[in-house]
Image (cartoon, coloured by chain):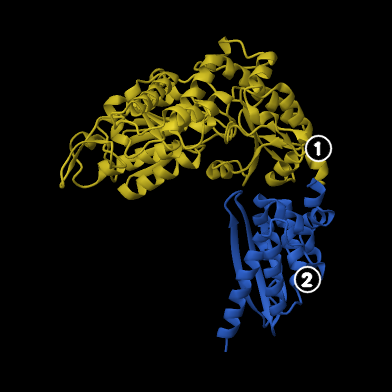
Chain colours: A blue, B yellow
Amino acid sequence: MSLEQLYQQIILEHAKLRTGSGLAETPVPAGASSGQSHQLNPVCGDEITVRVAVSDGKVTQLRWDGEGCSISMASASVLAELAEGMDVGSFTAVIGNFRDVLRSRGKLAADPEILGDASAFEGVSKYAARVKCAMISWVAAEDALAQALTSSTAAP
Amino acid sequence: MAFVPTSESRALLSPALTDDEVLRIRNDFPILSRPMGGYPLIYLDSGATSQNPISVIEAEQEFYEQRNAAVHRGAHLLAVEATESFEDARETLAAFVGAGADEIIWTSNATEGLNLLSYAFLNSSLPGAAGPAARFALGAGDEIVVTEMEHHANLIPWQQLAERTGATLRFIPVDDAGALDLDAAAGIVGPATRVLAFSHASNVLGTINPVKTLVAMARRVGALTVLDACQSAPHLPLDVKDLGVDFAVLSGHKMLGPTGIGVLYGRSELLNALPPFLTGGSMITTVTMERAAFLPAPQRFEAGTQKVSQAIALAAAANYLTETGMDRVHAWESLLGQRLVEGLSSIPGIRVLGPAPGEERIGLASFDVAGVHAHDVGQFLDSKGIAVRVGHHCAQPLHRRLGLTASTRASTYLYNTTSDVDAFLAAVAGVRAYFGA
């Protein structure tokens, strides 16, 4: 597989764009419940923190802070773009689908109808060492979402 | 080529391998002729694991085909031959590092060697430990000193030992040039120091540490020295007696040997005073239902079935290196190391870690590429058939000290050519443009 199939143009662009980065700069929207998760890649030492805000069954905001390789930064950027406005059930399903594709070792094709720009990470699944790079922000988002939902059900 | 050998460096007195010799050496390593995605393989990751010459692969195969039997037991001829081969291997490794055969303990890897030591020290520190083991006992008020450039394998076992005994772990800092701060060391290694554990050569920086200076510091205060020789034993002439260290570890797969085998060296007198770590078969004299008496070293530390074929193959690796000449291997790799560091330093946006061009280093170079993550650098190089290591190289504290989370490392061995280095440098020069940095 060529380098271009792994580093699709959209990945290289998002790696610079970093949509949704900057936790401190953007407060959680008023009235939303939020959860935050910090994840570490022990192989390279990269870290990411993702915060998810939920309101009326919808993801109203996803913000993150992190440093890492172009795959992990682009993945977080695409995730932020994709998540906002999505209802919680669909978002959970998308995360599950993304994980399935990434862990398929190239056997499962990405469906752009479901994953949108995140389909560009399909090629990563053939590089076992890089799957974690692409997954790390999604794992953090999944955890943050679970926390946000717990805190919203706990609220009166 | 500009080069400043230190007083402890001997290799530069020898001529380096010639290009023709290196090309002949390459023919002994089958894997080096494997194409990688349409490119010839350029293997620059020997600091992580080295490749094996045919003689090593054949030694392991020959053992299984002709002499496989349990060692140190059984009266039959096969068992005798297996035991002789196993003990011959020990003598080969002893000669390779300048030790006596009874001072060589087989371990699974260097990490196990360091854990063996730290657990034996822990056993010495438990209530009830007495007699000769008392000299290894640690407790509150005692200090274990390591360095800021250690591989996690020579850090975490000591952290754990300090935590469990109440001793304090201290470290010798690294300066901005990637050398140990010896002035600081003189203030840190003091009367409370019981153990000084440090690497001979840094797996990240390439720095060769002044072993004799550190040993002298430790001796003045009666501390034991533990040398991590993983990055030196494969690459330069090693003489543990000349260096004066009390213990040393090395890794087989980093010196042309198989995985699953390493060596712990200890001065005979110390090994025989040290309580065992693993206990069981093959390491005892008399056993009753209540207690056991232990054999002297090395058997004292070799409980259970040993790594026989690996030890024999490692001896074949040591023989290969000795026949090539460790002085000449070191001289060749020093040239490659200088070529790496000079070439990298001349590429815009590259920050080389460790000693500057012209200063002594082993044949490796780690570097940071401005605006490009190490994983992306490694992936880019891989697409051209170039294998390097990326990440923190099991040295997170050192990377933190350098203000990085990860770096890229190219590490050479006796089978690398100057063209390997040049192809690598040409590829690195294209990295930033590709990622738009």
In this rendering, does residue B96 appear at all? Answer: yes
Residue A131 occupies quadrant = bottom right
Which of the 4 image quadrants contains residue B227?
top left
- Whether A136 is drawn above or below B416: the answer is below
- Residue A114's tag is 2
Q: Furthest residue to the bottom?
A: A156
* SS assignment at label 1: loop
Decide which of B62, B57 is in the foreground and name it: B62
Vertical relation: A153 (above or below) B94: below
Q: Pick the quarter of the image with the C terminus of chain B.
A: top right
Q: How far apart are labels 1 and 2 at the CA level? A: 35 Å
Give the residue pinned by disc 1.
B430
Task: Please give the name of the residue rendered at 39% of the width and 42% of the height, measured from the top-left corner.
Answer: B158
Q: Which chain carries label 1?
A: B
Q: What residue type is labelled 2?
A: Ile
Q: Position of residue B375 (x, y in %)?
A: 68, 46
Q: Which is nearer the eye, A151 or B391? A: B391
Q: Is residue B228 visible?
A: no
SS for callout 2:
helix
Which numbered disc covers residue B294? none
Q: How many marks?
A: 2
Q: How crowded is mark 2: few (under 14 residues within 10 Å), some or many (20 or more)?
A: some
The kind of residue on which mark 1 rests is Gly
- Position of the N terminus of chain B, as image quadrant, is top right
